[in-house]
Image: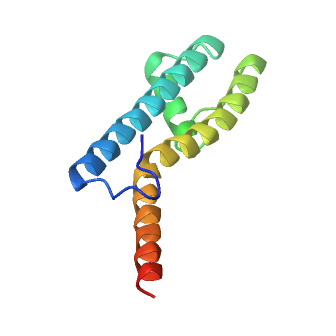
Amino acid sequence: MFESRHEPLAPKTLFLIRLMRNTMIGILVIAISLFLGMCGYHYFEMMPWVDAFVNAAMILSGMGPLGSLTTSAGKIFAGFYALFSGLVFILAISLIFAPIIHRYFHKFHLDTDVKSNKH
């Protein structure tokens, strides 16, 4: 997927394609997570879809639920969904920034290889 340490740096167009692909995958992961949260709130708390969307979006963004939860199953779901959402956030950010970090590290290794060959 990425070039190895001893290969030349990928062209900028390939880097941008990787960045766009990873961003789209990150957005897809967030959208699927949002949909799962909506389904959970709709099923366990009997919330209308719009309220389920708002609560799932607030949990997924780290803000917390808007309304109070009334059922024990809904509260358990909300707890697990909050834990899940934290991991999804870390995953999505990692996916999006992976090409940027890889390119930086690759340039760093190329710079040290060039400097060590000159001395």
Image quarter of residue 62:
top right
Q: Residue at x 55, y 17 (%)?
A: 47
Position in image of residue 99 (x %, y %):
41, 51
Q: How is the image coloured?
A: rainbow
Q: Position of residue 75 (x, y in %)?
A: 73, 26
* Spot occupied by residue 92 in the image (x, y as percentages of width and height): 49, 41
The residue positioned 57% from the left and 37% from the top of the image is 88
Q: Return the x and y of residue 108 as percentages of the image width and height.
A: 45, 70
On screen, residue 68 versus residue 6, left or right, reads right
> At x 40% / y 35%, what residue is drawn?
27
The answer to which of 68 and 57 lies nearer the viewer is 57
Seen in the picture, residue 20 relative to 40 is either above or below; the reply is below
Q: Nearer the viewer, residue 61 or 68?
A: 61
Mark count: 0
Where, by quadrant of the figure, is residue 45 drawn? top right
Near-viewer residue (52 or 34)? 34
State the image quarter where residue 31 is shown: top left
Which residue in the rendered view is the most extreme toward the bottom? Answer: 119
**Left or right of 10 on screen, residue 22:** right
Viewer-closest of 69 and 115: 115
Say if 86 sits above or below 107 in the image: above
Tell me the quarter of the image containing the N terminus: top left
Would residue 25 be found to the left or right of residue 59 on screen?
A: left
Q: Which residue is found at the position 48% from the left and 21% from the top? A: 35
Query: Which residue appears farthest toward the left when viewing the image?
Result: 13
